[in-house]
């Protein structure tokens, strides 16, 4: 064979030494016509062609495709699949949670969009560069990775914020974060494959380009015996079945990994402190008297409310929910999140605590399907959380549909769904939401299923204390079997949604329910012609047997004192004031009697306020005291029956406000319409009576942007 053409026609992609060896022959030429010689020449040509083909399967001595290319291509598909699966999951979760998965009204949307655009442009620049240099590839990889991590971090931070503020982990956000990681992984691997493409080298349009999405082909430059090349040929890579299975498994690694990370974060990671304890073997009783000794004090910031749990007081503040040990004020359990609580109450037996918390506005409803006649359309989306007050365990948390929220001893009614308080499972979904404005503790085994407003058009004076309510009750196991209860006493001072359309908004319509008991006008009058009332148990009414309903006489009454009842866990009635006095006159009559009779559901006994030694009828507040020339103040609680009083001095320097500015006087508890914020509040809980004092706002520097917190001092009295 001539050697000159072979040397001149060597392709730059083919190794010269291999090609020269394959093209040479040391055998002597055969004579024409000799069959053996002819066969030898044919075999030599075949071997030469095969050697050339084999040589062309390697470029610069490296195998094709380069080591690791197939794995990278599989991982790239894995990133794409992970992003697509994350999108599908997000759409499914948006339906399940009733949240618009495509809209986040938050400050991170715009920066995340800008970063994503920069990320795409960097990735696109790597794709269109004909020869991607190493430095450029590294810079683009760093940029794409950093942007992907930044977007993922912002989304996870958004998940953390919404979790802390609502008490609910929104997996939609975690799914988005997983999708962002999948996209970042896809882009990074694509950049690496484009760099490999530059090293082969080959064009992006050729079928042996490692960065192409379609099947990969091997290029073969065939040469005939004359040594002249013909057009390149591409043959598909023939991979063993085992290799294909291996690559398929590799492509699933990103999907599985990101799914496990998102799922594990949702179920096992809480971005704030939530501690629980074992249920105590015994529970402290509710105190029957005020007590005269302060057994502990505790300072907290921005205390919003204190309620009685089954084992002691539970405090709501900017630190979350904290259950206190009644013996020493220590923490039993806590849920330290930044909840924006709108509703809080315990079950009739105080073993469960229900909360409604506002969900951040960054998450929107996907539709108005949750809004009903019993739900105001301007209400924010809210979350419902239910805790076991003995252990602190969270037994229920979900997005609420709005409307009523009630607890029995064993079940929760939220909008149109009944849940078990034992394990949070759904017990029943109603065909339509419960038509009541009432939210709070119901009966031990009974729900309030309807609330009726009285017709006040025929009343001569809407300002008087002649206010009543009617409700319908039903067993928790059969909400459709309702029984109506009429002539229930209400608190005329408390504003209520049912009467919000009236010009004068001083009369409420929802009854006060304590331990499953309500106050009802009996339809009879005393010797002075004043209407009489009695206490009845709504569980007895819900059973349907009206003949065996036990009643406890409460004497004459004008209504139920909601604040005194809530503070003392009793049913405390107002005295009968007659129809000639307006609400404003009684509300501003500081020395007037505000409690006539106290009914204690724990003992099922009714006691006149003049004989009651506990908090319900006591005169409580802050009084001024004289200490030589200095005017001091003290917290005073004076039982109405003449039992020893409690006095807690407030000296200068112990509060952020001057003690004299805290003085409001000691009067029986009562809600004051449009009254200034009270500095003290009182709660009767198992084992201790808690007195809360607002000492004032904490000092801050002028550069502080946030509102300074109020410092509260809690006194445990026994």
Image (tube, rainbow, N blue to C red):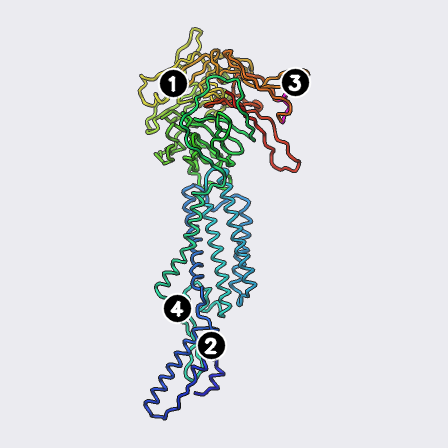
Image quarter hosting the N terminus = bottom left
Observer-nearest of 438 and 174 = 174
Query: Dot 2 lies on which element?
Result: loop
Q: Earlier in the sequence, mark 2 or mark 4?
A: 2
Gap between marks 3 and 2, in whole Å?
Answer: 104 Å
**Residue placed most toward the observer, 694 or 593:** 694
Which mark sits nearer the N-terminus, 1 or 3?
1
Q: Which mark is residue 463?
A: none
Among the two numbered marks 1 and 2 on one chain, the one whose residue lies closer to the N terminus: 2
Left or right: 544 with respect to 681? left
Within 10 Å of disc 4 (Cα), the crowding (few <14, some 14-19, many 20+) is some
Q: Residue furthest right?
A: 629
Residues in magenta? 656-661
**Residue at mark 3:** 631
Along the line of sight, which residue is nearer the eye, 684 or 212? 684
Tell me the SS state at disc 3: strand
- Mark 3 to mark 4 CA distance (whole Å): 96 Å
Residue 304 x, y percent position in the rendering: 53, 29
Place of residue 603 in the rendered image (x, y in percent of width and height, measured from the top left): 40, 17
Position above or below: 105 against 436: below
- Which residue position holds label 4? 237
In which quadrant of the rendered view does residue 458 lie? top left
Q: Is residue 657 magenta?
A: yes
Whole-angstrom CA distance, mark 1 to mark 3, is 48 Å
> Which residue carries the number 2 mark?
14
For the question of whether residue 578 can be seen, the reply is: no
Name the residue carrying label 1: 536
* Disc 1 crowd, CA 10 A, few/some/many (<14, 14-19, 20+): some
Q: Nearer the viewer, mark 1 or mark 3?
A: 3
């Amino acid at each position: 064979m001539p050697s000159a053409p072979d040397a001149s026609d060597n392709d730059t992609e083919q190794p010269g030494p291999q090609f020269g060896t394959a093209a040479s022959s040391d055998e002597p030429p055969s004579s024409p016509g000799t069959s053996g010689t002819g066969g030898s020449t044919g075999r030599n040509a075949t071997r030469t062609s095969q050697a050339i083909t084999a040589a062309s399967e390697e470029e610069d001595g490296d195998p094709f495709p380069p080591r690791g290319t197939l794995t990278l291509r599989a991982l790239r598909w894995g990133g794409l699949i992970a992003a697509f699966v994350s999108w599908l999951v997000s759409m499914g979760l948006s339906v399940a949670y009733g949240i618009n998965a495509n809209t986040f009204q938050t400050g991170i949307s715009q920066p995340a969009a800008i970063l994503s655009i920069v990320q795409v442009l960097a990735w696109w620049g790597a794709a269109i560069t004909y020869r991607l240099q190493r430095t450029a590839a590294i810079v683009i990889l760093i940029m794409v990775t950093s942007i992907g991590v930044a977007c993922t971090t912002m989304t996870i931070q958004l998940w953390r914020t919404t979790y802390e503020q609502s008490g609910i982990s929104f997996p939609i956000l975690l799914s988005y974060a997983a999708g962002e990681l999948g996209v970042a992984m896809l882009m990074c691997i694509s950049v690496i494959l484009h760099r490999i493409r530059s090293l082969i080298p080959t064009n992006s349009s050729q079928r042996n380009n490692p960065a192409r999405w379609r099947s990969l082909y091997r290029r073969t430059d065939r040469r005939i015996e004359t040594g002249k090349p013909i057009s390149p040929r591409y043959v598909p890579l023939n991979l063993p079945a085992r290799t294909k299975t291996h690559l398929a498994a590799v492509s699933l690694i990103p999907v599985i990994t990101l799914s496990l990370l998102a799922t594990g974060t949702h179920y096992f990671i809480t971005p704030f402190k939530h501690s629980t304890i074992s249920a105590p073997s015994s529970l402290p009783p509710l105190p029957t008297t005020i007590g005269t000794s302060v057994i502990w004090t505790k300072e907290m910031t921005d205390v919003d409310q204190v309620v009685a749990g089954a084992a002691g007081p539970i405090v709501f503040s900017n630190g979350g929910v904290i259950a206190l040990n009644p013996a020493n004020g220590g923490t039993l359990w806590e849920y330290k999140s930044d909840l924006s609580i709108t509703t809080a109450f315990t079950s009739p037996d105080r073993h469960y605590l229900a909360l409604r918390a506002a969900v951040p506005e960054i998450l929107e409803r996907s539709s108005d399907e949750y809004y009903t006649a019993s739900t105001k359309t301007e209400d924010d989306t809210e979350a419902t959380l239910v805790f076991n007050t003995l252990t602190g365990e969270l037994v229920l948390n979900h997005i609420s549909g709005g409307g009523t929220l009630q607890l029995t001893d064993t079940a929760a009614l939220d909008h149109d769904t009944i849940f078990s308080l034992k394990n949070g499972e759904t017990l029943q979904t109603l065909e339509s939401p419960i038509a009541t404005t009432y939210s709070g503790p119901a009966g031990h085994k009974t729900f309030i299923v309807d609330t009726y407003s009285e017709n006040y058009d025929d009343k001569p004076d809407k300002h008087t204390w002649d206010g009543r309510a009617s409700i319908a009750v039903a067993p928790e196991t059969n909400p459709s079997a309702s029984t109506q209860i009429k002539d229930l006493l209400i608190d005329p001072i408390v504003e209520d949604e049912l009467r919000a359309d009236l010009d004068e908004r001083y009369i409420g319509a929802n009854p006060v329910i304590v331990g499953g008991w309500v106050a009802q006008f009996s339809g009879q009058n005393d010797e002075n012609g004043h209407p009489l009332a009695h206490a009845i148990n709504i569980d007895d009414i819900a059973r349907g047997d009206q003949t065996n309903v036990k009643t406890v006489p409460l004497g004459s009454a004008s209504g139920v004192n909601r604040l005194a009842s809530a503070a003392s866990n009793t049913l405390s009635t107002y005295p009968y004031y007659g129809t000639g006095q307006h609400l404003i006159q009684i509300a501003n009559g500081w020395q007037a009697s505000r409690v006539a009779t106290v009914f204690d559901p724990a003992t099922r006994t009714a006691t006149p306020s003049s004989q009651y030694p506990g908090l319900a009828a006591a005169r409580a507040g802050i009084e001024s005291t004289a200490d030589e020339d200095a005017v001091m103040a003290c917290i005073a609680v004076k039982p109405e029956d003449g039992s020893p009083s409690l006095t807690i001095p407030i000296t200068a320097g112990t509060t952020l406000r001057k003690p004299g500015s805290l003085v409001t006087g000691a009067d029986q508890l009562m809600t004051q319409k449009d009254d200034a914020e009270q500095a003290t509040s009182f709660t009767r809980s198992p084992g201790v009576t808690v007195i809360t004092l607002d000492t004032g706002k904490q000092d801050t520097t002028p550069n502080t942007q946030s509102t300074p917190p109020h410092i509260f001092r809690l006194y445990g009295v026994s």
